[in-house]
Image (cartoon, helix red, strand yellow):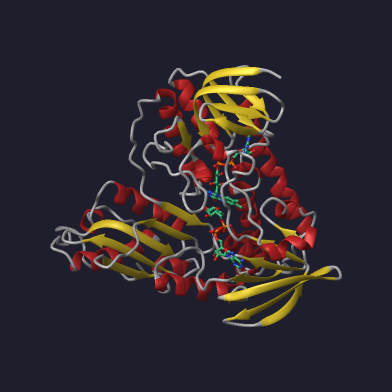
């Protein structure tokens, strides 16, 4: 049992906590990084990286099967489920090892392996018996996979992002419950890997898209690959060696599956943290009320970053928030506001879904481009989906976008950077676009916005596209 005194104590060594520790230390603070296990970040171990590795395998299978359209015959495409999952884990383990190696680079004595609990606003008690006093504390405890009650009673047959990548082989059939980012990505990947997959959601929307045309496109395009049951209530029970789902609502039915993957949201991980003893104001979901520009909880010497604040649960936000939290924790009671970057979320389906900036809103000017007939997309035999751009009158300053089309993961960067720089549709059209590319497809949406504003099409630039653009 030891007592530790420090300037900044950080609870949680994930992406947010590591960024917080680094920035507080760079500001000259003494730091302590407390984690229950130092397993490596969620992103590397059970999040971004293994999911993208599984998607890569799935897309390899999909493209091999689809090569016939180009006159390339690939016979007998077979999925080695064990091999696919082994590669996921092998590559994933390298990402995890790199994260773990970064713990070892921290100054000696920085890391404490224990679960932390608030004793008061400046003190923590650890489950190894140690105590910590700190001038300020950063909460970076991440999130956990919530499992709705009915699914809790069926043991190992229920998978989450924590167990799905540990399977030794692919199941023959899989129910995916929850059509958010995790459910959509993994359902499509499993289906492409030959698993008989069905996706369920109690809402009638998928992937968090706010635009009804984009929603309709997601349902149509993903629905061509696997059955979707949206707007349904689901009951579940174990049935011999399988799981039986019954659903009712917008559709109804009953079916047995080998496994069920639950992806119904990830609330903040606050269990045992003693937030009540920290004297913080909590919102209706039990999350400390905090300032998005300083990451400070009220006026307390406590800061919160990453999935723990349930605000923007994606990696680059966890990293930036951690950096701001660490900086302000080090300088507390003086804190500095850092403007947020434009909201940016990608879901790595095929085609990918990108949601940027503000939603359309009542007064937004909108521009639409279909990718069902877009030149480069047709060349690549992946012509589907659409783009919706939003802009503010009177000049057509870009404010947001939703893309569900080939290349959306890359084109979204171009657009989100333009939004953050305050550029107009006309400004973007003044830039060169190469032919034939997916980016060219954005021009018709940008022109639509220009046509509705006082900002003219840039002079000296083509107002039409060549055939095949
Ligand atoms: C399947 C999946 C796929 C994803 N894909 C993407 C993607 O492609 N792109 C993207 O941008 N984002 C993606 N995300 C989201 C992204 O992974 C998270 O937003 C990000 O990793 C959160 O980082 P964090 O630091 O907040 O949490 P974590 O990395 O989870 O860190 C929290 C740490 O806190 C520790 N901890 C918790 N409670 C305590 C306590 N009381 N005491 C001590 N330690 C504690 C935990 O052990 C853990 O190490 C994905 C998430 C999932 C689940
Ligand atoms: N590509 C990425 O960046 C990426 C990938 C995966 C996850 N993530 C992050 O992880 C977070 C969590 O992902 P998620 O997909 O678990 O959550 P989510 O909140 O995005 O989606 C949960 C879905 O489950 C549905 N749902 C909830 N309870 C249900 C029930 N009882 N029955 C049926 N459906 C139910 C909801 O309607 C919703 O569609 C996301 O918010 C995202 O920020 C990001």
Q: Residue 321 is drawn in which quadrant?
A: top left
Q: Residue 146 is drawn in which quadrant?
A: bottom right
Q: Position of residue 79 (x, y in %)?
A: 74, 62
Q: Is residue 448 left or right of residue 244?
A: left
Q: Position of residue 272 (x, y in %)?
A: 64, 40
In what quadrant does ligand 2 lie?
bottom right
Q: Can the viewer see residue 105?
A: no
Residue 9 in the image: above or below residue 94: above
Q: Residue furthest right?
A: 240
Q: What residue is rendered at 60% in x and 65% in y?
A: 178
Q: Is residue 215 left or right of residue 35?
A: left
Pick whichever, 156 or 403, lies toward us. Answer: 156
Question: Quarter of the image containing the N terminus?
Answer: top right
Q: What residue is rendered at 69% in x and 73% in y?
A: 235
Q: Position of residue 326 (x, y in %)?
A: 46, 29
Q: Is residue 15 left or right of residue 417?
A: right
Q: Position of residue 282 (x, y in %)?
A: 48, 46
Question: Quarter of the image containing the C terminus?
Answer: bottom left
Residue 124 in the image: above or below residue 263: above
Residue 343 in the image: above or below residue 130: below
Q: Is residue 109 left or right of residue 465?
A: right
Residue 297 in the image: above or below residue 453: above
Q: What residue is rendered at 62% in x and 76% in y?
A: 227
Q: What residue is rendered at 51% in x and 18% in y?
A: 30
Pick whichever, 85 or 375, lies toward us. Answer: 85
Q: Can the viewer see residue 281?
A: yes
The number of callouts visible is 0
């Amino acid at each position: 049992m030891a007592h530790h005194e420090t300037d900044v104590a950080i609870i949680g060594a994930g992406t947010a906590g590591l960024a917080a520790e680094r920035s507080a230390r760079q500001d000259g603070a003494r730091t302590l990084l407390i984690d229950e296990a130092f397993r490596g970040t969620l992103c590397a171990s059970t999040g971004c990286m293994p999911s993208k590795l599984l998607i890569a395998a799935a897309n390899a299978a999909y493209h091999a099967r689809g090569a016939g359209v180009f006159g390339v015959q690939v016979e007998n495409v077979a999925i080695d489920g064990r091999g696919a999952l082994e590669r996921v884990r092998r590559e994933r383990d390298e990402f995890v090892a790199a994260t773990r190696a970064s713990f070892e680079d921290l100054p000696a004595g920085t890391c404490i392996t224990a679960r932390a609990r608030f004793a008061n606003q400046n003190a923590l008690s650890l489950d190894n018996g140690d105590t910590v006093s700190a001038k300020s504390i950063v909460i970076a405890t991440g999130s956990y996979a919530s499992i709705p009650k009915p699914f809790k009673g069926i043991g190992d047959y229920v998978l989450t992002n924590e167990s799905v990548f540990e399977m030794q082989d692919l199941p023959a059939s899989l129910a995916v419950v929850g059509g958010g980012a995790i459910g959509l990505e993994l359902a499509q990947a499993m289906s492409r890997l030959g698993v008989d997959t069905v996706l369920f959601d109690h809402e009638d929307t998928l992937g968090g898209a706010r635009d009804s045309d984009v929603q309709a496109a997601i349902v149509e395009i993903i629905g061509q690959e696997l059955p979707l049951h949206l707007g349904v209530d689901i009951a579940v029970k174990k049935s011999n060696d399988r799981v039986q789902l019954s659903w009712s609502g917008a559709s109804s039915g009953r079916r047995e599956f080998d496994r069920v993957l639950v992806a119904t949201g990830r609330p903040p991980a606050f269990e045992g943290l003693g937030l009540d003893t920290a004297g913080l104001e909590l919102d209706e979901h039990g999350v400390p009320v905090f300032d998005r520009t300083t990451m400070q909880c009220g006026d307390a010497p406590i800061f919160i970053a990453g999935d723990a604040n349930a605000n923007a649960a994606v990696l680059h936000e966890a990293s930036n928030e951690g950096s701001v939290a660490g900086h302000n924790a080090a300088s507390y009671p003086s804190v500095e506001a850092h403007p947020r970057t434009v909201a940016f979320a990608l879901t790595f389906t095929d085609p990918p879904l990108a949601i940027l900036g503000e939603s359309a809103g009542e007064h937004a000017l909108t521009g639409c481009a279909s990718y069902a007939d877009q030149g480069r997309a047709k060349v690549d035999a992946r012509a589907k989906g659409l783009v919706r751009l939003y802009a503010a009158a009177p000049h057509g300053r870009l404010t947001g976008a939703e893309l569900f089309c080939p290349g959306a993961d890359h084109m979204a960067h171009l657009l989100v950077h333009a939004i953050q720089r305050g550029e107009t549709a006309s400004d973007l059209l003044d830039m060169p676009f190469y032919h034939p590319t997916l980016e060219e497809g954005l021009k018709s949406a940008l022109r639509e916005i220009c046509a509705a504003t006082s900002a003219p099409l840039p002079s000296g630039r083509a107002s039409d596209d060549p055939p095949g653009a």
